[in-house]
Image (spheres, grey):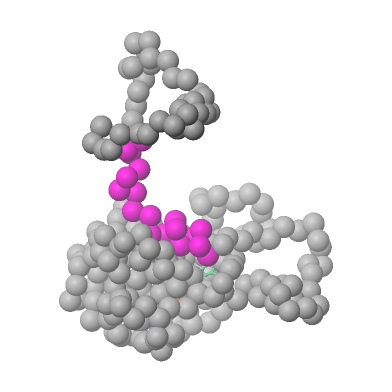
Amino acid sequence: MKLLVLGGTKNLGRHVVETALAAGHDVTLFNRGRTNPELFPGVHRLTGDRAAPDVLAGGEWDGVIDLSGFLVRDVSLSAAVLRDRCAHYTYMSSIAVYASKTHRGMTESAPLLPWPAGAPEDEFTMDLYGPSKVRCESLLSATFGDRTAAVRSGFVVGSYNPDFGNWGWALAHGGSMECAARPEQPVQYIDARDLANFLPHDGSNDGTFQLDNSRALAAGLRLRPGVEVARDYIAWLRAGNIPPEPPH
Ligand SMILES: NC(=O)c1ccc[n+]([C@@H]2O[C@H](COP(=O)([O-])OP(=O)(O)OC[C@H]3O[C@@H](n4cnc5c(N)ncnc54)[C@H](OP(=O)(O)O)[C@@H]3O)[C@@H](O)[C@H]2O)c1
């Protein structure tokens, strides 16, 4: 599919682009060309700043993955330009959206952070990271309806990524390991490759092997366990049999 990646050259985004290219998607990158500009030389690029995303008005995409949306103003601008130019808009959000940091086992429906009255929509501060993600999620829902999804991640780890960096560095090169004050307190993390796989997944083949066979089962179809199917087929091959060429 035709995929527009907003960002894509630093941490998670780099994995997303690698994964999308490996899956055969037709990728376009939109960024300022400052961060690792030597990456992905064969990939189509649109150069620009999120504060003025006019260059996006020249294309159409099946999917957008927004990895660089930190400011409400920026996401609002790209939403306006892309509303009628893409089928689906995936927004990379964060667990920083949740109002509570003490409740355990929160789900996606947990209360979200409010927007602080009078806070600027065009200036990044760490205090506004969570509230901005909340506002961006909500403005994208208002713009795209069910054509948008927000993915709220915790720590993203692995190559290209800084989190776990001091532990990884100490294990790789020696040195002291910083440890949690309370060792029983868990840390949730996700490997950037797993998250990247999840983000470019287009679902276009999801139904192929999930057909409803209840009528056949009711009519008497009996299915032997998969392990028996595999074991007998391997034994058949080992006996010197050669399967026919498709079509079959
Ligand atoms: N890392 C984590 O643990 C974690 C956890 C939860 C959520 N997230 C979210 O994951 C997302 C991914 O972050 P990432 O750093 O891995 O993404 P990335 O896509 O690898 O890197 C950021 C990209 O944004 C571009 N960019 C930055 N400022 C820009 C601007 N003003 N206009 C246009 N392009 C701009 C950069 O290129 P140029 O500099 O060349 O423009 C770069 O390509 C973020 O939204 C973050 O909130 C991360």
Locate residue 24 relative to residue 68 in the image: left or right. Answer: left
In this rendering, does residue 239 appear at all? Answer: yes
Q: How many marks?
A: 0
In percent of width and height, residue 156 lies at: 56, 66
**Residue drawn at (44%, 82%) of the image:** 120
* Image quadrant, ligand 1: bottom left
Q: Quadrant of residue 246?
A: top left
> Which residue occupies the extreme front position in the image?
240
Rendered-image quadrant of the N terminus: bottom left
Q: Nearer the viewer, residue 80 or 160?
A: 160
**Residue drawn at (48%, 82%) of the image:** 124
> Which residue occupies the extreme left position in the image?
58
**Residue 74 magenta-highlighted:** no
**Residue drawn at (66%, 75%) of the image:** 165
Rendered-image quadrant of the C terminus: top left
Which residues are drawn in magenta?
Answer: 192-209
Locate residue 225 relative to residue 52 in the image: left or right. Answer: right
In this rendering, does residue 68 appear at all? Answer: no
In percent of width and height, residue 163 lies at: 62, 72
Magenta segment, prevailing SS (helix, strand or loop)? loop
Above-or-below relation of 108 to 22: above
**Residue drawn at (38%, 63%) of the image:** 22
**Residue 204 magenta-highlighted:** yes
Above-or-below relation of 32 to 40: below
In percent of width and height, residue 50 lies at: 34, 81
Above-or-below relation of 239 to 20: above
Above-or-below relation of 226 to 174: above
> Which residue occupies the extreme bottom position in the image?
34
Q: Nearer the viewer, residue 133 or 45?
A: 45
In percent of width and height, residue 38 lies at: 40, 85
> Which residue occupies the extreme top position in the image?
220
